[in-house]
Image: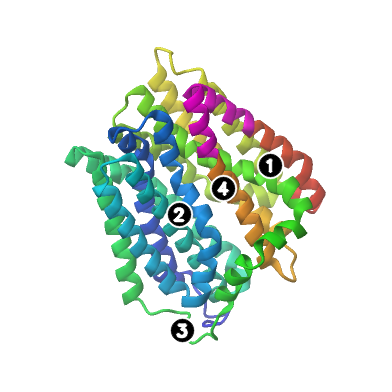
Amino acid sequence: MSTTDQTFTFRSIALPALVPSLLFAIGEGSVIPVIPAIASNLGATLAVAGFIAGMTMLGQLAGDIPSGWVVSRIGERRAMIYAALLAIAAVVVCMLATTPVLFGIGIFFIGLAAATFALARHAFMTSFVPLQYRARALSTLGGTFRLGWFIGPFLGAAIIALTGTSQAVFYIQGVCALGVIVLLLVVPDPTEGLSKPDAGEKFVAEESAGLFKTLFDYRGVLLRVGSGVAVVGALRASRMVILPLWAVSLGLGEANTALIVGIGGAIDFALFYTSGQIMDRFGRLWSAIPSMTGMGLCLVVLAFTHTLPGAVVWFIVIAIGLGFFNGIGSGIMMTLGADLAPPANPAPFLGAFRFTSDAGTAAAPLAIALIVAVASLPLAVGLMGVVGFAGAAILLRNVPRYVPRKLAR
């Protein structure tokens, strides 16, 4: 390891990991709230716009396996640089797109870049941070990502107001990705001097290797707890698709949409540490169940407000409520994965666990788009709320069976 337990400080991971992660998250956060509106402006129907919004999640799912191979072959820092370059290329495609299809391809590659970047920074933390600091470092990393999602929509709203065009938000992502590249090229790599492949590179390679065999070997816990975690991922992904779609259906402008999503992101960011405190003091279920049921209730209520005279006010209130309940569930997926992973060889299980949750994340936007196409957006929103209740029931039933009771509670 490049640093001893005595000499490690959180400042040592700021420039090589935390600041690049913040920049990458700001770029994503500025773009995602307005994807359905841009797709609609290009001629997409509401259902197609929802499908395109979900292409980021599909890109992340598709990138889960190859990104592990990439990081293990070229290293963490180079993988983050290449991911930022891919994000820039995707931004160019999105800005030049004249059809929904081409725009959707660009959005897919943004998700692919995000998957590679996320796995590379995970590998860096595994390589560089001493074990007794790792949980706090990963929690800080998660908070950094949420901070980016808080800042990004407000920057997006500002640039839309200044330029008068929603596609200008891609400039933010392009500049942020360029900043990541410059920073990583200028700042010395603290993992230099480690044996190659280092601990992080080995970890992500093991995560990606033999995925389907691992899924089969741990089919019991993945079918029970993993299915609940997949619903958590689905509910979170549906929030990021439903809110922009709902805004489009209400006729709200892109800048106003970004502002409303940003307010919800601010509440979400403010609660990420509180969630960890709840899980450590009271148990995992005291975070997971209120989060899932609260988000489910918000979506069910939202489904009945579309034709009300105060529909916009209801939309703002629900966006804030979703941010609150998502915030109190921050970190639940990573925490349950760490609880369930076999200590002797955790990487393959964690790879399968992440793939299970990402499958739910990718499936939700597709389901929403399909329901909108054959029925209506309010029905899709209401059904996702019911799915949230089902996910809470799955976790309540199965977490105590697989997680030590003192942790599950």
Do residues under tags 3 and 2 come within 8 Å of each other at their CB atoms?
no
Do residues under tags 4 and 2 come within 8 Å of each other at their CB atoms?
no
The x and y percentages for residue 59 are 47, 52
| Disc number for residue 145 | 2
Q: What amino acid type should be assigned to the residue bearing mark 1? A: Trp
Q: What amino acid type should be assigned to the residue bearing mark 4? A: Ser
Q: Which residues are magenta?
A: 364-387
| Disc number for residue 286 | 1
Circle 4 residues within 10 Å: few <14, some 14–19, many ≥20: many
Circle 2 residues within 10 Å: few <14, some 14–19, many ≥20: many
Which numbered disc, 1 or 3, marks the residue that appears first in the sequence? 3
Please give the name of the residue rendered at 75% of the width and 71% of the height, measured from the top-left corner: 344
The x and y percentages for residue 183 are 32, 70
| In-front residue for pair 75/334 | 75
Please give the name of the residue rendered at 49% of the width and 67% of the height, measured from the top-left corner: 120
Main secondary structure along the magenta-highlighted residues: helix
Q: Which residue is mark 4?
A: 330
- For marks 4 and 2, give the CA distance: 11 Å
Q: What amino acid type should be assigned to the residue bearing mark 3? A: Glu
